[in-house]
Image: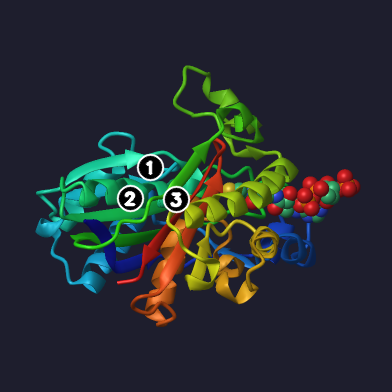
Amino acid sequence: MTGIICGTGSYAPSYIMDNNEIASMVETSDEWIRERTGVATRHIIKDETTVSMACEAAKRALDDGGVKGEEVDLIIVSTISSNVILPCTACEVQKELGAMNATCFDMSAACSGFVLAYNTALAYLSGGMYKTALIIGSESLSNLTNWKDRGTCILFGDGAGAAVMRAKEGRMYLPVTHSDGMKGKALTCLSRHTKVSPEHMTDPEYYMQMDGQAVFKFAVKKVPEAVNEVLEKNHIDKKEIAWYIMHQANRRIVEAVAKRLDEPIEKFPMNLQEYGNTSSASIGILLDEMKRDKRLKSGQKIVIAGFGAGLTWGASVMEWM
Ligand code: COA
């Protein structure tokens, strides 16, 4: 028994912030940002929230998969930037979809979140506990971004990506995931839900802080290792892989991973130029885009790979529906 993705959906806020707008807030330039990151624009919430984007992406995924709300028996939302703590975002999605039969919970796994939500749903579906799952990555990172820090504010964006999964007879591919809490300082953000007095809430620690070079080196080393490991574990040759759908953090990271894997860059689709880094939403948004423009074809083998704060990283193989 395994689980397959049978529908995808995504949502991006209509407000688009380009690099020139960022250059009006911090000392940087469109040219610098494009060259070092590949990012040209990012979508930023105005009226939207993490919950509203998750609901919209989820509705689109259900429509796409021809699945009714009441058929869903598991909803997992991956987010580090929800506007609600209680009830969890997944329960808010349940309410909006009328998915009254679903078990709902959120997970906090930052930029590895979509891969970990996929693996978690896959374990439940292949184990026979549930038949239909909805996984969603939804992020309002602009709320956690320090717009005075040019080392981070150039990178991130907001949005949501979702996928519906069904239990199905077939081969289950085993995932590979790793965590290294010892290296957690490379990417941090303190919660604002503490007993600290309000005037300290705007201190830099309450926004995302990052050692950019450390994260870069970690990603280009660990992601190819995880991809090789997942392929070996499942006895799959690289030639069989149609697409490597990586977390969309930085074009240079994606290019370096392709090089280390000795695979053509054409197998590494990117949309980070439009969205920036949307953390746990990025892989879901890209999957949805590729499904809609028909790049994803039935029977193709796909690797999804995530990495980020924690530090955490991992890769999974799937066969497209
Ligand atoms: N605009 C212009 N100059 C900038 C800048 C910006 N936005 N950000 C940093 N600089 C400057 C630095 O101050 C430094 O100047 P100096 O040489 O005079 O000291 C110079 O550019 C180089 O800085 P550095 O930090 O070495 O740049 P970099 O090439 O490592 O690029 C990142 C910075 C953040 C783009 C890059 O490290 C990165 O992408 N890291 C991975 C981040 C990531 O993907 N995180 C999320 C993972 S989930």
Q: Is residue 71 visible?
A: yes
Residue 289 appears at what percent x and percent y?
43, 73
Instruction: Evaluate whether residue 142 shows in this view.
Output: no
Residue 188 locus on image (x, y percent) = 59, 34
Q: Nearer the viewer, residue 222 or 50?
A: 222
Label 1 environment density (alpha carbons within 10 Å; few <14, some 14–19, many ≥20): some
The picture places residue 306, in percent across and down from the top left corner, at 51, 51
Which of 226/220 is in front? 226
Residue under the point 50% across and 55% down: 232
User: In this figure, which residue is indicated by the disc labeled 1?
Assistant: 83
**Residue closest to the far bottom:** 294
Q: Earlier in the sequence, mark 2 or mark 3?
A: 2
- Placement of the C terminus among the 4 image quadrants: bottom left
Secondary structure, mark 1, is loop
Indicate the quadrant where residue 63 lies: bottom left
Q: How many marks?
A: 3
Q: Are marks 2 and 3 in contact (CB under 8 Å)?
A: no
Residue reaching furthest to the front: 235
Q: Which mark is residue 51?
A: 2
Contact check, label 2 and label 1, Cβ < 8 Å: yes
